Image (cartoon, rainbow, N blue to C red):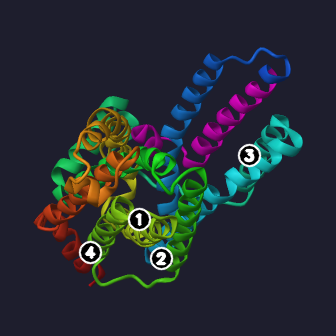
Amino acid sequence: AGALSDTWNKKRTMLVCDSLAAISTIVVFILLETDHLQIWHLYGLNAVNGIMNTVQQPAAEVAVSLITPRTLYQKVSGLKSFSNALNTMLTPIIATALYAFAGMQAIILVDVSTFLVAFIVLWTLIRIPQQKPVSNAANESVLKAAGEGIRYLKQNRGILNLILFLAGINLTASIYNAALPAMLLSRAGGGATALGWVTTVTGFATLVGSIVASAAKAPKSRVKVIYWSLLFSMSTENFLLAFGKSVPMWCIGAVLGWIAIPLMGTNLGAILRLHIPIGMQGRVYATRNTLQFCTIPLGYLLGGFLIDQVFEPFVAGQAPNALLNFLFGSGKGSGAAFLFAVIGFIGVATCLIFSRNRAIWSLEQEEQTEET
């Protein structure tokens, strides 16, 4: 996908991918209206959407680099984070209201309408300059061009190690995502309302953090911002969720855990855009996505398995006066709380280990050299 996005016209790639995704939505509408919609249809159409997103995402990343001045990379990343946070908060609310008052047909109509608006804006108002790739990708096979992304990362250990660092953090974060509903829904003092509050507060914290990240000036040390943001997140939220026994304490943990994440994301995005040649960004971003996000499904699988098969049975088997019962309480959900404490230590250890990686710190020196 990255090799194709480096070779193909960026605007056309995004327009075609979005169009095919919209067509899949229309197909769902037709199947729903004719009473032929089945589960396997949704799996197939979601697979099409996933493929389109895989091709579109690197093209969109490169397009942003092409139309954005280098000095505004951080602000653009902050605005992107703000947009994602706003979508995460508002989409479920709007979708639920639409479904309650107008049904699924209204949701599909809104989906297609927003696609048309985005399509027209991209097609008519946004000019994306064309830039020749670093290598003669047009005369290379797709597989050979894709391999250049891997070779680039091997030759640039700082970026590779930074990506591996984020892959480790994503593993911990996805275990967190899998464990959060299990703990809050089943633990004493929790329930659906508690989960709703924590989720809402998480969205607001991300929104506020995105605004701060968009308005903030470029820091002297982007690497420090990344490390300290993740270390602060890992060393606060997980432990407050683990040891807290009330909704206010869990909400405080959510705020502390997510308020700095947009700062991390904006500076990470700026580092990648500043160091990776634009002609190589599609391939490198596609490779980055594979390495950095491959741990997410593994984390979800591990989260469910560890709660059901390891931590819940282990805590349930403790004596009433055991230390674990004192720390995490007893009953259902206490094992998940214990898991949060464990992943908190793992997340902190991951940050401390990679904080000593010289290759990552060399990215900062290279950036300062470019600016001078």
Give the x, y percent position of residue 274.
35, 67
**Could you classify mark 1 by the number of other residues whose Cα lies within 10 Å: few (under 14), some (14-19), or many (20 or more)?**
many
Give the x, y percent position of residue 230.
31, 66
What's the amino acid at mark 4? Glu
| Residue named by callout 1 | 265
Cα distance between the residues tagged 1 and 2: 9 Å
Q: Quadrant of the N terminus?
A: top left
In depth, the one of 240 and 219 nearer the eye is 240
Question: Quarter of the image holding residue 355?
Answer: bottom left
| Residue named by callout 2 | 213
What's drawn in magenta, residue-wise? Answer: 1-30
- Identity of the residue drawn at 79% across and 28% down: 29
Give the x, y percent position of residue 353.
13, 61
Secondary element at tag 2: helix
| 10 in magenta | yes
In depth, the one of 254 and 371 nearer the eye is 254
Q: In the rendered structure, are the residues bearing label 4 and label 1 in contact, judged by CB atoms less than 8 Å apart? A: no
| Residue named by callout 4 | 367
Which numbered disc, 4 or 2, marks the residue that appears first in the sequence?
2
Secondary element at tag 1: helix
Nearer the observer: mark 4 or 1; the answer is 1
Q: Is residue 67 visible?
A: no
Which numbered disc, 4 or 1, marks the residue that appears first in the sequence?
1
**Could you classify mark 4 by the number of other residues whose Cα lies within 10 Å: few (under 14), some (14-19), or many (20 or more)?**
some
Label disc, if present, on residue 115 of the rendered structure:
3
291 in relation to 62, above or below: above
Give the x, y percent position of residue 114.
76, 49
Q: In the rendered structure, are the residues bearing label 1 and label 2 in contact, judged by CB atoms less than 8 Å apart? A: yes
In depth, the one of 188 and 185 nearer the eye is 188
- Identity of the residue drawn at 20% across and 58% down: 350
